[in-house]
Image: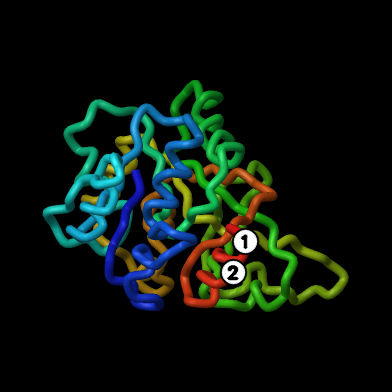
Amino acid sequence: MIPARYAASRFPAKLMKDLMGKPVILRTYEAAVKTQLFDAVYVVTDSTLIFDTISNAGGRAIMSFKEHDCGSDRIAEAVEDMDVDIIVNVQGDEPFIDRESLAGVLDVFQGDVKKEIDLASLMVRIRDKDEIHNPNTVKVIVDHYNFALYFSRSPIPYHRAEEVDPPYFKHKGIYAFRKRALMDFQKLPMLPLEATEKIEAIRYLEYGKKIKMVETTISGIEIDTPEDLKRAQKEWK
Protein backbone atom coordinates (compact mmCIF):
# COMPACT_ATOMS: atom_id res chain seq x y z
CA MET A 1 0.00 0.00 0.00
CA ILE A 2 1.35 3.41 -1.02
CA PRO A 3 -0.43 6.26 0.79
CA ALA A 4 -0.40 9.34 -1.42
CA ARG A 5 -1.63 12.67 -0.09
CA TYR A 6 -1.60 15.44 -2.67
CA ALA A 7 -1.08 18.34 -0.24
CA ALA A 8 2.36 18.23 1.38
CA SER A 9 3.25 21.05 3.76
CA ARG A 10 6.99 21.18 2.99
CA PHE A 11 6.74 20.52 -0.76
CA PRO A 12 3.19 20.95 -2.14
CA ALA A 13 2.15 18.47 -4.86
CA LYS A 14 5.55 16.77 -4.67
CA LEU A 15 4.14 13.37 -5.69
CA MET A 16 3.07 14.79 -9.04
CA LYS A 17 6.41 16.46 -9.77
CA ASP A 18 8.23 15.17 -12.83
CA LEU A 19 10.99 12.62 -12.30
CA MET A 20 12.59 11.99 -15.67
CA GLY A 21 9.34 11.84 -17.64
CA LYS A 22 6.96 10.38 -15.03
CA PRO A 23 5.40 11.70 -11.81
CA VAL A 24 7.17 10.75 -8.57
CA ILE A 25 4.17 8.69 -7.38
CA LEU A 26 4.13 6.64 -10.57
CA ARG A 27 7.87 5.98 -10.29
CA THR A 28 7.33 4.76 -6.71
CA TYR A 29 4.40 2.53 -7.72
CA GLU A 30 6.39 0.97 -10.56
CA ALA A 31 9.36 0.36 -8.24
CA ALA A 32 7.12 -1.46 -5.74
CA VAL A 33 5.59 -3.63 -8.46
CA LYS A 34 9.03 -4.38 -9.89
CA THR A 35 10.17 -6.02 -6.64
CA GLN A 36 7.66 -8.87 -7.28
CA LEU A 37 7.34 -9.34 -3.51
CA PHE A 38 3.64 -8.55 -3.20
CA ASP A 39 0.34 -10.16 -4.13
CA ALA A 40 -0.96 -6.69 -5.03
CA VAL A 41 0.24 -3.09 -5.00
CA TYR A 42 -2.15 -0.15 -4.54
CA VAL A 43 -1.84 3.61 -4.31
CA VAL A 44 -4.28 4.94 -1.68
CA THR A 45 -5.00 8.61 -2.22
CA ASP A 46 -7.28 11.56 -1.52
CA SER A 47 -6.53 13.06 -4.94
CA THR A 48 -8.41 12.37 -8.17
CA LEU A 49 -5.33 13.59 -10.03
CA ILE A 50 -3.12 10.94 -8.41
CA PHE A 51 -5.86 8.30 -8.74
CA ASP A 52 -6.20 8.99 -12.47
CA THR A 53 -2.42 9.07 -12.98
CA ILE A 54 -2.01 5.56 -11.55
CA SER A 55 -5.16 4.16 -13.18
CA ASN A 56 -4.34 5.57 -16.62
CA ALA A 57 -0.92 3.91 -16.41
CA GLY A 58 -2.58 0.53 -15.80
CA GLY A 59 -1.99 0.52 -12.05
CA ARG A 60 -4.27 -0.04 -9.06
CA ALA A 61 -5.53 2.91 -7.05
CA ILE A 62 -8.01 3.37 -4.21
CA MET A 63 -9.73 6.62 -3.26
CA SER A 64 -9.93 7.56 0.41
CA PHE A 65 -13.41 8.63 1.52
CA LYS A 66 -12.36 9.98 4.92
CA GLU A 67 -9.96 12.70 6.04
CA HIS A 68 -6.76 11.23 7.48
CA ASP A 69 -3.89 12.66 9.51
CA CYS A 70 -1.34 10.02 8.49
CA GLY A 71 -0.59 7.18 6.10
CA SER A 72 -1.45 4.42 8.58
CA ASP A 73 -5.01 5.73 8.93
CA ARG A 74 -5.38 5.99 5.16
CA ILE A 75 -4.18 2.42 4.65
CA ALA A 76 -6.36 1.09 7.47
CA GLU A 77 -9.45 2.42 5.70
CA ALA A 78 -8.37 0.80 2.43
CA VAL A 79 -7.64 -2.69 3.83
CA GLU A 80 -10.41 -2.96 6.42
CA ASP A 81 -12.45 -5.39 4.31
CA MET A 82 -9.51 -7.11 2.61
CA ASP A 83 -8.49 -10.67 3.52
CA VAL A 84 -4.80 -10.00 4.18
CA ASP A 85 -2.29 -10.88 6.90
CA ILE A 86 0.64 -8.54 6.26
CA ILE A 87 0.41 -5.04 4.79
CA VAL A 88 3.48 -3.09 3.70
CA ASN A 89 3.39 0.71 3.71
CA VAL A 90 5.74 2.22 1.11
CA GLN A 91 5.95 6.02 1.16
CA GLY A 92 4.86 7.68 -2.08
CA ASP A 93 7.98 9.87 -2.13
CA GLU A 94 10.41 6.90 -2.19
CA PRO A 95 10.93 6.08 -5.89
CA PHE A 96 14.27 4.38 -5.13
CA ILE A 97 12.85 1.58 -2.96
CA ASP A 98 14.68 -1.70 -3.47
CA ARG A 99 13.78 -5.38 -3.29
CA GLU A 100 16.52 -6.31 -0.80
CA SER A 101 15.35 -3.88 1.89
CA LEU A 102 11.67 -4.76 1.50
CA ALA A 103 12.45 -8.48 1.60
CA GLY A 104 14.33 -7.94 4.87
CA VAL A 105 11.28 -6.34 6.44
CA LEU A 106 9.01 -9.18 5.30
CA ASP A 107 11.46 -11.80 6.61
CA VAL A 108 10.81 -10.54 10.15
CA PHE A 109 7.36 -12.13 10.08
CA GLN A 110 8.62 -15.41 8.66
CA GLY A 111 10.61 -16.00 11.83
CA ASP A 112 7.95 -14.68 14.21
CA VAL A 113 6.26 -18.02 14.96
CA LYS A 114 4.42 -16.76 18.05
CA LYS A 115 3.23 -13.63 16.20
CA GLU A 116 4.61 -11.33 18.88
CA ILE A 117 5.89 -8.65 16.49
CA ASP A 118 3.33 -6.05 15.46
CA LEU A 119 5.38 -4.08 12.93
CA ALA A 120 8.70 -4.18 11.12
CA SER A 121 10.48 -1.18 9.66
CA LEU A 122 13.80 -0.03 8.19
CA MET A 123 16.70 2.02 9.51
CA VAL A 124 19.93 3.12 7.90
CA ARG A 125 23.14 4.31 9.59
CA ILE A 126 23.68 8.08 9.57
CA ARG A 127 27.27 9.23 9.16
CA ASP A 128 26.69 12.89 8.28
CA LYS A 129 26.56 15.20 11.32
CA ASP A 130 24.27 17.68 9.60
CA GLU A 131 21.73 14.94 8.95
CA ILE A 132 21.86 13.86 12.60
CA HIS A 133 20.79 17.37 13.59
CA ASN A 134 18.28 17.83 10.73
CA PRO A 135 14.70 17.76 12.12
CA ASN A 136 13.44 16.51 8.75
CA THR A 137 15.41 13.30 9.38
CA VAL A 138 13.60 11.03 11.83
CA LYS A 139 16.05 9.18 14.07
CA VAL A 140 15.41 5.88 15.86
CA ILE A 141 17.10 4.17 18.79
CA VAL A 142 16.79 0.43 19.38
CA ASP A 143 17.43 -2.11 22.10
CA HIS A 144 19.92 -4.98 21.95
CA TYR A 145 17.48 -7.02 19.86
CA ASN A 146 16.74 -4.19 17.37
CA PHE A 147 13.30 -3.40 18.76
CA ALA A 148 12.50 0.31 18.52
CA LEU A 149 12.75 2.25 21.78
CA TYR A 150 11.90 5.71 20.43
CA PHE A 151 11.73 7.85 17.30
CA SER A 152 12.63 11.55 17.27
CA ARG A 153 13.42 14.51 15.09
CA SER A 154 16.08 15.45 17.65
CA PRO A 155 19.51 13.78 17.73
CA ILE A 156 19.12 10.60 19.78
CA PRO A 157 21.00 9.46 21.73
CA TYR A 158 22.33 12.71 23.18
CA HIS A 159 26.12 12.49 22.86
CA ARG A 160 27.29 13.46 26.35
CA ALA A 161 30.16 10.99 26.89
CA GLU A 162 32.86 11.90 24.39
CA GLU A 163 34.69 8.60 24.87
CA VAL A 164 31.67 6.74 23.46
CA ASP A 165 30.91 6.71 19.73
CA PRO A 166 27.20 5.84 19.51
CA PRO A 167 25.62 4.82 16.20
CA TYR A 168 22.87 7.04 14.79
CA PHE A 169 20.11 5.59 12.65
CA LYS A 170 17.65 7.21 10.29
CA HIS A 171 14.17 5.76 10.20
CA LYS A 172 13.09 5.00 6.65
CA GLY A 173 9.33 5.34 6.31
CA ILE A 174 8.63 1.79 5.16
CA TYR A 175 6.52 -0.37 7.48
CA ALA A 176 5.18 -3.89 7.41
CA PHE A 177 2.17 -4.40 9.69
CA ARG A 178 0.14 -7.26 10.96
CA LYS A 179 -3.38 -6.29 10.01
CA ARG A 180 -4.56 -6.32 13.62
CA ALA A 181 -1.92 -3.73 14.60
CA LEU A 182 -2.96 -1.46 11.77
CA MET A 183 -6.66 -1.72 12.62
CA ASP A 184 -5.87 -1.01 16.28
CA PHE A 185 -3.91 2.09 15.26
CA GLN A 186 -6.85 3.86 13.64
CA LYS A 187 -8.97 3.42 16.78
CA LEU A 188 -6.37 4.76 19.19
CA PRO A 189 -6.27 8.52 19.90
CA MET A 190 -3.09 10.47 19.38
CA LEU A 191 -1.08 10.95 22.57
CA PRO A 192 1.28 13.82 23.51
CA LEU A 193 4.56 12.33 22.26
CA GLU A 194 3.24 11.68 18.75
CA ALA A 195 1.53 15.08 18.73
CA THR A 196 4.79 16.77 19.71
CA GLU A 197 7.10 15.03 17.24
CA LYS A 198 4.57 14.49 14.42
CA ILE A 199 5.85 10.93 13.89
CA GLU A 200 3.10 8.32 13.54
CA ALA A 201 5.37 5.42 14.55
CA ILE A 202 5.43 6.84 18.08
CA ARG A 203 1.73 6.03 18.52
CA TYR A 204 2.48 2.33 18.18
CA LEU A 205 5.13 2.59 20.90
CA GLU A 206 2.93 4.66 23.19
CA TYR A 207 0.34 1.88 23.11
CA GLY A 208 2.83 -0.93 23.67
CA LYS A 209 3.19 -2.29 20.13
CA LYS A 210 6.47 -4.03 19.26
CA ILE A 211 8.38 -2.64 16.26
CA LYS A 212 11.29 -4.71 14.94
CA MET A 213 13.83 -2.59 13.08
CA VAL A 214 15.86 -3.98 10.19
CA GLU A 215 19.11 -2.27 9.26
CA THR A 216 19.76 -1.62 5.60
CA THR A 217 22.74 -0.03 3.89
CA ILE A 218 20.63 1.31 1.02
CA SER A 219 19.48 4.82 1.86
CA GLY A 220 17.90 5.90 -1.43
CA ILE A 221 16.45 9.40 -1.78
CA GLU A 222 13.23 10.52 -0.09
CA ILE A 223 11.72 13.49 -1.88
CA ASP A 224 10.76 15.92 0.89
CA THR A 225 12.06 19.15 -0.66
CA PRO A 226 12.75 20.66 -4.10
CA GLU A 227 16.45 20.03 -3.45
CA ASP A 228 15.68 16.32 -2.93
CA LEU A 229 13.90 16.24 -6.28
CA LYS A 230 16.96 17.70 -8.00
CA ARG A 231 19.13 15.01 -6.36
CA ALA A 232 16.67 12.34 -7.45
CA GLN A 233 16.67 13.56 -11.05
CA LYS A 234 20.47 13.51 -11.09
CA GLU A 235 20.54 10.02 -9.54
CA TRP A 236 17.94 8.71 -12.01
CA LYS A 237 20.16 9.69 -14.93
The residue tagged 1 is 235
Indicate whether 118 appears above or below 172: above
Residue 108 quadrant:
top right
Residue at (38, 52) in percent of width and height: 26
**The disc label shown at residue 191, or none:** none
Could you classify mark 2 by the number of other residues whose Cα lies within 10 Å: few (under 14), some (14-19), or many (20 or more)? some
**Tag 1: residue type?**
Glu
Tell which residue pokes out farthest to the top in this image.
113
Q: State if disc 2 and disc 1 touch (CB < 8 Å).
A: yes
Indicate whether 209 appears above or below 70: above
**Tag 2: residue type?**
Arg
Between the residue at mark 1 and the residue at mark 2, the CA separation in whole angstroms equals 6 Å
Residue at (47, 44) in percent of width and height: 31
- Quadrant for the N terminus, please: top left
Q: Percent x, y for residue 146?
A: 62, 45
Residue 124 in sight from this viewpoint: yes
Total count of labels:
2
The residue tagged 2 is 231
- Quadrant for the C terminus, please: bottom right
Q: Secondary structure at mark 2?
A: helix
Q: Is residue 32 left or right of residue 2?
A: right
Depth check: 123 or 204 in front? 123
Depth check: 25 or 206 in front? 25
Q: Is residue 160 left or right of residue 223?
A: right
Q: Percent x, y for residue 21?
A: 44, 59
Residue at (32, 71) in percent of width and height: 13
Q: Is residue 231 left or right of residue 39?
A: right
Tell which residue pokes out farthest to the left in this image.
65
Residue 191 quadrant:
bottom left
